[in-house]
Amino acid sequence: MTTAFSASQWLKQLSADGSSVELPELLWYQRHTKVLNLKPTISIQSKLAGTYLARSKGRGMEFDEVRHYQPGDDVRTIDWRVTARSGKVHTKLFREEKERPVFIVTDLTDSMRFGSSLLFKSVQAAHLAAVIAWHVKQHGDKLGGLVFSNQQHRELKPQGRSHGVLRYLQALQQCHHSAVNSNGITLSQALGQQRRLSRPGSLVYILSDFSQLDEQALRHIRAISQHNEVTCCQISDPLELALPASARGIAAIRNQQQVVSAELADPKLRARYQQQQQQQRSQLAMSLQQVGCKYLDISAGEPIISQLEQIHYGR
C-alpha cells in the first residue's frame, strides 16, 4: 500500500521534477508491480513456449486432467497409478504453455506535454508504461511496442527479460527529451504501425490523452482488438475536467473562428465546462469500448501507484 504524499513529497521520492522523464524515476517502479494483473482473458494463440496456459490440450509443462486412454494417445503419458486402481487404462493430459507478447504504445506528443498539478500527462504516461514494463518482465513475457512524439518515434520489437524493459524505458526518455523534428508521427500512424507489429493473442496497452483520435485511429484499434486484448488508458489532467475553485478573472479563449472572453468565477460557466468535459470523456470511453477495448481513466494529478491500487483492489 502507498502512503498519501503531497505533490512535492512524491516528486522528491521519485527524484523527479514532473515535467521531464529520467531513468531513475522509471527504475523506481521495479519494486511496485503488484498493482497490475496481466493474466490473459482471451485465448493465447502464439505457438511459442511461454508462461501462460493455452486452452488447447496437449503435451506441455502443466498437468490438466486424467481421462480414459484413447487410440493414438502417447503411451508415455499413461497414468499407471490411476490405471492400477481403476483396472482401466488412463492417460494424463497437459495444458500447453504459450507465450504472450505485451506491447505498449505510449503517446508523448505535444498535447501530452501539459500538467497543472503533479505531472505532465506525458510523464504520467511514461510512469504507467514503466509499471507495465516491469510487471511484464516479472512474469517472463516479452515486451515491445511504440514510443512516439511530434519529433520522433521508436518501434520496438518484443524482447524478454531486463533488456526488453530497459530498452523501452530508454526510448521513453529519449523521445521525451528530443527537440529535433526528425520522424515524428501521429496517433493514427502509431496505431497503424502497432497493427502490423501485433501478433494474435498479444496484450496491447495504448497510453494517450486520445486528443488525436479520429476514425482512422479507431479502425486501427478495432483491427488490433479483433485478435488481441487491448487496454486504452486515457491520461488526463485535473484542469481538463473542472476549473479550479480558486480561479478568478477574465480568460481569453480561442476557437477556430474567434476569441471570446470568459469570467472564470461564473458558476454557470464552471458547471457548463465540467458538464461538457464529462460528456466528451464519456463519448470517448464509449467509442473505445465499442471497438473492443478495455478503458482506464488515469489522472496526471495523482501518483500512478495510488490509482492502480484503487483499480486493482476495487476501492
Image (tube, grey):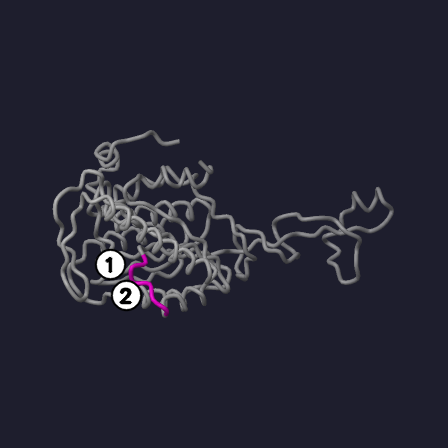
Q: Which amino acid type is shown beneath numbered disc 1?
A: Thr
Looking at the rendered structure, the secondary structure element under dot 1 is loop
Residue bearing the label numbered 2: 186
| Lower sequence index among marks 1 and 2 | 1
Which quadrant holds residue 247?
A: top left
Magenta residues? 210-215
Q: Residue at x 15, y 58 (%)?
A: 260
Q: Which residue is mark 1?
A: 109
Asked whether, in this view, residue 185 is left or right of residue 223, the answer is: left
Which quadrant holds residue 177? bottom left
- What residue is at 67 percent from the left and 48 percent from the top? 64
Residue type pointed to by label 2: Thr
Residue 157 vertical position relative to residue 216 in the rendered view, above or below: above
Under tag 2, what secondary structure? loop
Give whichever of 205, 310 is nearer the camera: 310
Q: Where, quadrant-wise, is the N terminus in this rendering?
A: top left
Toward the top, the furthest residue is: 3
Left or right: 1, with 45 as reference point? left
Q: Is residue 118 magenta?
A: no
Q: Position of residue 178 (x, y in %)?
A: 18, 57
